[in-house]
Image (cartoon, grey):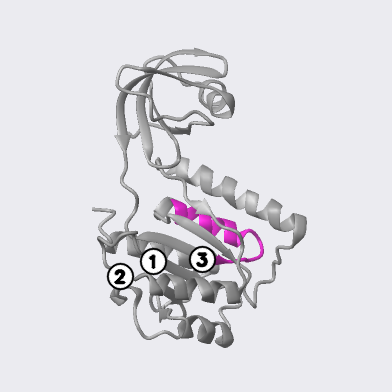
Amino acid sequence: MSAPVFLAEGTPLAGYGVDSVFVLDGTEGRHAGVVQRRGPGERIDVVDGAGLRLEGVVESVDGERVRLRVQGVVAEEPPEPVVTLVQALAKGDRDEQAVEAATETGADAVIPWQAERSIVVWRGARAAKSQAKWVATVRAAAKQARRARVPQVAEPVTTRQLAARVRDVVGAGGVVVVLHEEAVTPLREVALPQQGTSPAAELLVVVGPEGGISATEVEALTSAGAVTARLGPHVMRTSTAGPVAVAILSERLGRWS
């Protein structure tokens, strides 16, 4: 069984080596030592959220302070291509469900999209609060999936801003896929970005809200360089489509080999 993962909070991991001692404290230390009651001899991984992982064994626990003896240091290579989920805002926490599962299946970044048919609207204080909720959701999902990298949650974008992002991504050699039930090309047949580019190309997957993506939005995104694709014969909820697409792409990219 893989070791549970905890995030280093404000403590750089770069200076730690094999047989050094790392003290996990703060919120994560409390979670490990008090909530989960981890004890001496148990394995724990500590990550910095940017690809660096310390593999350690608990030596002692003093309340919220967990002392670890480092047994291994692993630096994961940056993802290539970067898989970004563009998730339309949706009601009933379906958008949060989508980004949670997409993080577990391999999304490297998340962009909230204020789509034309999104019932939920992020404005003012609500926007900041909602984005913070997505950040917390992604963080917890990354830990659940034992990931050393925590996906970044971007600022919400309008359709105009998204179209501009599409042009930039395609212009840099990336690919943007809009999931659409009327598309002819299956996602498994969409051409992927060429690997080995510098900087790494990006692969954007766009998922609409409950009411779907409007014809105007499809036109705006495809005119900017996006392609449309379908997942299969069934129409999925907005909370399901993104994670399934990310899973298919992760398999195609060899990440699940």
Q: Dot 1 corresponds to which residue?
A: 203
Q: Which mark is residue 86?
A: 3
Task: Work out whether 196 lies above or below 65.
Answer: below
Residue nearest the viewer, comparing 24 with 31: 24
Q: Residue furthest right?
A: 125
Q: Residues within 10 Å of mark 2 (few under 14, many from 20)?
A: some
| CB atoms of marks 2 and 1 within 8 Å | yes
- Amino acid, disc 1: Leu
| Start-end of magenta stretch | 86-103
Q: Nearer the viewer, residue 196 or 117?
A: 196
Q: Position of residue 55 (x, y in %)?
A: 34, 28
Cβ–Cβ under 8 Å for marks 3 and 1: no
Q: Position of residue 215 (x, y in %)?
A: 56, 87
Q: Amino acid at mark 2?
A: Leu
Mark nearer the N terminus (3 vs 1):
3
Q: Element at badge 3?
A: strand
Residue drawn 34% across and 82% down? Answer: 185
Q: CA distance from mark 3 to mark 1?
A: 10 Å
Residue with the mark numbered 2: 192
Q: In the image, what residue occupies the spot 38% across and 41% down? A: 51
Q: Secondary structure at mark 2?
A: loop
The numbered mark, 2 or 1, whose residue comes first in the sequence reads 2
Picture residue at 67% right of the left edge, 54% below the top: 130
